[in-house]
Amino acid sequence: MEHRDRVVMITGAGGRLGSPCALAFAREGARLILTDLDASRLEAVARAARAVGARVAAIPADVRLDADVERVVAEGTAALGPIDVLVTFAGYVPTTYVVDMPTEEWDRVFDVNVKGTMLCCRTVARQMIAREAGGAIVTISSGAGTSARAGAAHYCGSKAAVNMLTQVLAIELGPYNIRVNAVAPGLVLDQVVRRGEGSPHPYVRDMLAAIPLGRTGTADEIAAAVLFLASPRASYVHGEVFYVSGGAHCGRAHMAVARGNIQTA
């Protein structure tokens, strides 16, 4: 168990990706500081983690607020000890065309996905630096950070910002032996969908055409990547955006193969 007795803080811990990751760390023997805006979802994952023997501090909070982030870190470390690992799952994923977008929606996406990530990283990094014991930070990006899509200007932009934030933090925190990496999930659904099977939503069908492995991912596969990057096995992995996408980030796999001579001018 690589994470036994390590203190792991996870934001967005009640979410579809955050919850399985919290349980994966729990099964590894980690002590968990869990936070989420939704108190009921948070308590559900906390109960599940305690059921496998984990010590858990579940603290509802809004990662957009400095005071809330400071409170989570203060209360969590008072209960379980200083933080060894931070994972930032908290995110907001609406879909709206730019011409129809309320300014408030744009602001909320960047407040949660970028500002919230920064506030958590800043607060935890300060503690790690003062402690002089190193640590690991895993931010959660997305394939959307490098792949534009209609209706997601704010989400794509926010995840591109997370990618750059991750790399800047890697430069700034590396001298303190604090490793910073991002996990960028591809399309993850509650149930695996494979190309050519069933009648998926048109968006899922089109996405599957661009995934070389020909299937959607699972939350457990995202959790496995997070646990690896947070572990000693990744001791020289730093400043990386780690794609877990079935190969969807490799290019436009759905494009027809170009054969023969094609005039482009």
Image (tube, rainbow, N blue to C red):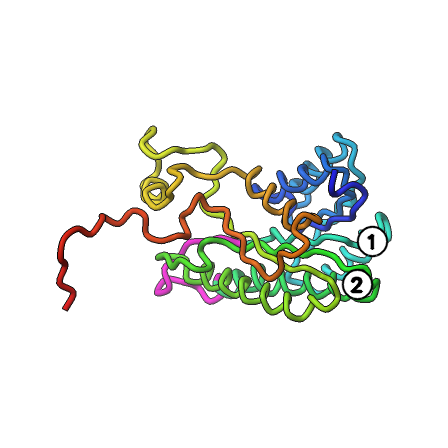
User: Which quadrant is the N terminus positioned in?
Assistant: top right
Q: Which residues are magenta?
A: 92-105
Residue at numbered disc 1:
77
Give the mark nearest the N terminus, 2 or 1: 1
Q: CA distance from mark 2 to mark 1?
A: 10 Å
Residue 77 position (above or below residue 111)? above
Q: Secondary structure at mark 2?
A: helix
Q: Nearer the viewer, residue 235 or 171?
A: 235
Q: Position of residue 256 (x, y in %)?
A: 22, 48
Q: Nearer the viewer, residue 121 or 101?
A: 121
Total labels: the figure holds 2
Residue 159 position (above or below residue 254)? below
Q: Position of residue 206 (x, y in %)?
A: 32, 44
Residue at numbered disc 2:
127
**Residue 150 shown left or right of residue 45 in the figure:** left
Type of amino acid at the residue the image marks with label 1: Thr
Q: Position of residue 171 (x, y in %)?
A: 64, 69
Q: Are marks 2 and 1 in contact (CB under 8 Å)?
A: yes
**Residue 56 shown left or right of residue 149 in the figure:** right
The mark found on residue 142 in the picture is none
